[in-house]
C-alpha cells in the first residue's frame, strides 16, 4: 500500500498537529504538541516538504485529540480544507475526483 504524506496544521510554532488521511477512513492525529514539540513537528514537516496549513483555532482543537485517534466528525469540514490544501500544493487530485475526459 502506498503511503500518503502527512498533513500538518499549525497555529504558529506554539501548537502543531500532523494528520494522516488514507482516503478511506477519517483522518488520524499522528503527532501533536506545544512549544518545543510543536517546533520539532514544524521543522520535520519543512524538512520533508510536508505542507503547513496555518490555522490556530483548528490546531488548538486538534492538539486535544489523543495520538492515533480519528478526527471527530465536528472537525471534518475544517480538516477537509487542510487535506484539500495539501493536495493542491502537491498538484494532486483526490481519488475519485479526477477530471472527466470527454
Image: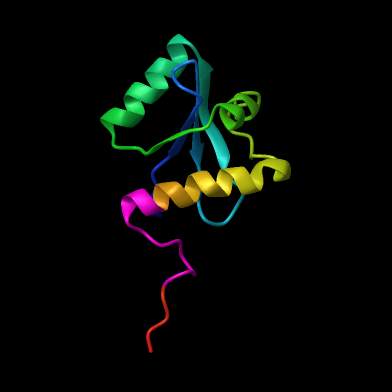
Look at the image and name its color scheme.
Answer: rainbow
**At x 72% / y 42%, what residue is drawn?**
74
Residue 41, image quadrant: top left
Q: Residue furthest top?
A: 36
Look at the picture and state if 70 lies above or below 91: above
Q: Residue furthest right?
A: 74
**At x 64% / y 47%, what residue is drawn?**
76
Left or right, residue 16 beside residue 91 = right
- Measured as percent of width and height from the top left, residue 53 is found at 45, 36
**At x 67% / y 41%, what residue is drawn?**
75
Look at the picture and state if 41 lies above or below 85: above
Left or right, residue 38 beside residue 73 = left
- Measured as percent of width and height from the top left, residue 59 is found at 56, 28
What span is colored magenta in the figure? 88-98
- Asked if residue 36 is among those painted magenta in the image, a careful observer would answer no
Predominant SS along the magenta part: loop
- Quadrant position of the N terminus in the picture: bottom left
- Measured as percent of width and height from the top left, residue 82 is found at 50, 44
Look at the picture and state if 68 lies above or below 24: above
- Measured as percent of width and height from the top left, residue 85 is found at 44, 48
Residue 94, image quadrant: bottom left
Given residues 31 and 94, the one toward you in this image is 94
Amino acid at each position: 500500500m502506498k503511503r500518503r504524506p502527512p498533513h500538518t496544521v499549525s497555529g504558529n510554532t506554539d501548537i502543531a498537529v500532523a494528520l494522516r488521511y488514507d482516503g478511506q477512513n477519517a483522518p488520524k492525529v499522528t503527532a501533536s504538541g506545544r512549544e518545543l514539540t510543536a517546533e520539532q513537528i514544524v521543522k520535520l514537516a519543512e524538512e520533508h516538504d510536508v505542507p503547513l496549513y496555518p490555522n490556530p483555532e483548528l490546531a488548538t482543537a486538534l492538539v486535544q485529540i489523543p495520538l492515533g485517534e480519528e478526527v471527530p466528525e465536528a472537525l471534518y469540514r475544517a480538516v477537509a480544507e487542510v487535506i484539500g490544501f495539501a493536495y493542491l500544493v502537491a498538484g494532486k487530485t483526490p481519488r475519485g475526483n479526477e477530471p472527466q475526459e470527454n
